[in-house]
Image (spheres, rainbow, N blue to C red):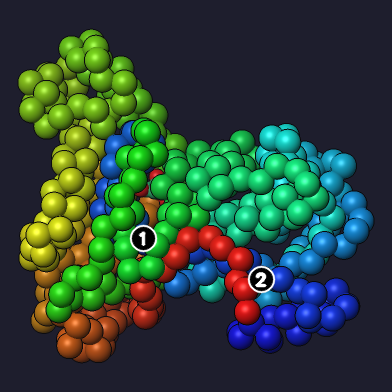
């Protein structure tokens, strides 16, 4: 939908003139490497995408936030005097959570009409929820500032969006998705230390290679319970390792060498989970080094190793993502492929020679369909900016 179509749609729903409608935008994200690492306090390498959540917005002078969407037939109305009461909304819970957290933090939440136009596919591991949260936070923060009250920079908006997801929506996610959605930079990935939030941009100019995103279209049914289970397992692993390595505050603080020396305190699944985290952190750092020296073949190998570790040690892939990445690796011109996001379904990211992308999409799509009965979707996506107001 074009910007003017979105404004016209807004005017049809809420009335008024299209000239008064403003547009805010936040990004979906892909994680290149560093999976299930953010909540262990380690390094990750996501990039914001041109798959985005747009919000058409206008203050309404009242005491309600009205919500509508272009892609689903749902509406909601939030009374800004009782924002804590919308936790069970069928749709609009993320927006309510953001408004609630912001109000408690001293932002002036003003009445407004909002229309969401989100082309981040839902439930695909590309962080549609983070994009909705951050776009909402950016809009409400701008309006709060215009009322002479508090505003937040993009890092603050990412953090409060994460809190909304943790405390209001009850999803125990880390900071990676919201940070990428807010802080992305066109053409770049973000090398983010999730313990300190220090970050550097890393160019995604990969020479003759493109990042291809493929959606397995497998519904991620197990995701939430297994996600929380993994978080509990790595917490248990850290507590045991701390008996040998008392200076480690986070599991990601444990180096490969220290881990190999201390791992005797761990066994079974807990040992496997911790091994994934420790070696995945190392792979993120090696990936960034490889990208900086233009060694894309090494990056491809690290993507493969990451997937194998998520499959065999962390056990979050599932047969669809394993099939999709296997077929991808076998395709001509592909030098690496892995699942991205929480797992159990959702998307894979592959490094493919630019002039072979069309052939890759065709052959992988057919093989995947024959093996699983599912149609994979491939996105023509690139690394984009984080959250901003669109000024036309
Ligand atoms: C989900 C969570 C993130 C992160 C990834 C796994 O996307 O929202 O915080 O933990 O899973 O890397």
Residue 357 horizontal side relative to residue 82, left or right: left
Location of residue 92 with respect to 165 vertically, above or below: below
Location of residue 15 with respect to 385 vertically, above or below: below
* Front-lying residue, 388 or 326: 388
Seen at 84% across and 81% down, the residue is 17
Q: Is label 2 in a helix, a strand or a loop?
A: strand
Give the percent coordinates (x, y) of residue 335.
12, 70
Quarter-of-image position of residue 294: bottom left
Q: Label for residue 23?
A: 2
Disc 1 target residue: 47
Residue 321 horizontal side relative to residue 228, left or right: left
Quarter-of-image position of residue 304: bottom left
User: What is the tally of numbered marks visible in this picture?
Assistant: 2
Mark 2 sits near ligand 1, with its Cβ under 8 Å away: no
Mark 1 sits near ligand 1, with its Cβ under 8 Å away: no
Of all residues, the one furthest to the right in this rendering is 62
Residue 307 horizontal side relative to residue 380, left or right: left
Quarter occupied by the C terminus: bottom right
Seen at 87% across and 62% down, the residue is 60
Give the percent coordinates (x, y) of residue 252.
26, 32
Which callout, 1 or 2, points at the residue further toward the start of the chain? 2
- Residue 251 appears in view: yes
* Front-lying residue, 72 or 30: 30
Location of residue 87 with respect to 239 vertically, above or below: below
Location of residue 21 with respect to 269 vertically, above or below: below
Q: Is label 1 in a helix, a strand or a loop?
A: strand
Give the percent coordinates (x, y) of residue 98.
66, 47
Quarter occupied by the N terminus: bottom right
Seen at 68% across and 86% down, the residue is 4
Give the percent coordinates (x, y) of residue 334.
14, 74
Within-10-Å neighbours for mark 1: few <14, some 14–19, many 20+: many
């Amino acid at each position: 939908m074009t910007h003017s179509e979105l404004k016209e749609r807004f005017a049809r729903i809420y009335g008024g003139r299209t000239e008064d409608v403003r547009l805010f935008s936040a990004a979906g994200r892909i994680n290149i490497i560093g999976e299930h690492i953010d909540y262990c306090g380690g390094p990750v390498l996501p990039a914001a995408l041109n798959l985005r959540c747009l919000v058409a917005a206008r203050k309404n002078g009242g005491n309600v936030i009205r919500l509508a969407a272009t892609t689903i037939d749902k509406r909601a109305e939030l009374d800004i005097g009782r924002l804590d009461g919308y936790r069970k909304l069928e749709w609009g819970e993320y927006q309510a959570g953001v408004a609630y957290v912001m109000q408690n933090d001293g932002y002036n939440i003003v009445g407004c009409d909002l229309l969401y136009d989100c082309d981040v596919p839902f439930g695909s591991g590309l962080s549609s929820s983070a994009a909705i949260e951050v776009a909402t936070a950016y809009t409400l923060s701008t309006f709060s500032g215009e009322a002479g009250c508090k505003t937040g920079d993009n890092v603050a908006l990412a953090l409060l969006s994460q809190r909304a997801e943790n405390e209001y929506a009850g999803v125990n996610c880390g900071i990676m998705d919201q940070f990428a959605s807010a802080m992305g930079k066109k053409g770049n990935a973000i090398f983010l230390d999730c313990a300190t939030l220090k970050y550097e941009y890393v160019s995604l100019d990969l020479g003759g290679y493109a990042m291809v995103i493929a959606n397995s279209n497998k519904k991620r049914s197990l995701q939430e319970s297994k996600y929380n289970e993994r978080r509990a397992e790595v917490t248990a692993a850290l507590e045991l390792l701390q008996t040998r390595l008392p200076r480690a505050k986070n599991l990601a603080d444990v180096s490969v060498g220290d881990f190999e020396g201390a791992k005797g305190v761990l066994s079974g699944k807990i040992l496997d989970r911790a091994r994934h985290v420790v070696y995945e952190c190392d792979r993120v750092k090696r990936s960034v080094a490889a990208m900086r020296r233009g060694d894309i073949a090494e990056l491809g190998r690290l993507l493969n190793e990451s997937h194998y570790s998520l499959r065999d040690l962390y056990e979050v892939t599932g047969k669809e993502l394993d099939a999709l990445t296997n077929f991808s690796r076998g395709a001509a011109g592909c030098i690496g492929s892995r699942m991205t996001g929480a797992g159990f379904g959702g998307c894979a990211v592959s490094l493919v020679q630019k002039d072979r992308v069309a052939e890759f999409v065709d052959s992988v799509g057919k093989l995947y369909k024959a093996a699983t009965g599912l149609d994979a979707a491939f996105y023509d996506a690139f690394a984009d900016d984080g959250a901003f107001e669109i000024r036309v």
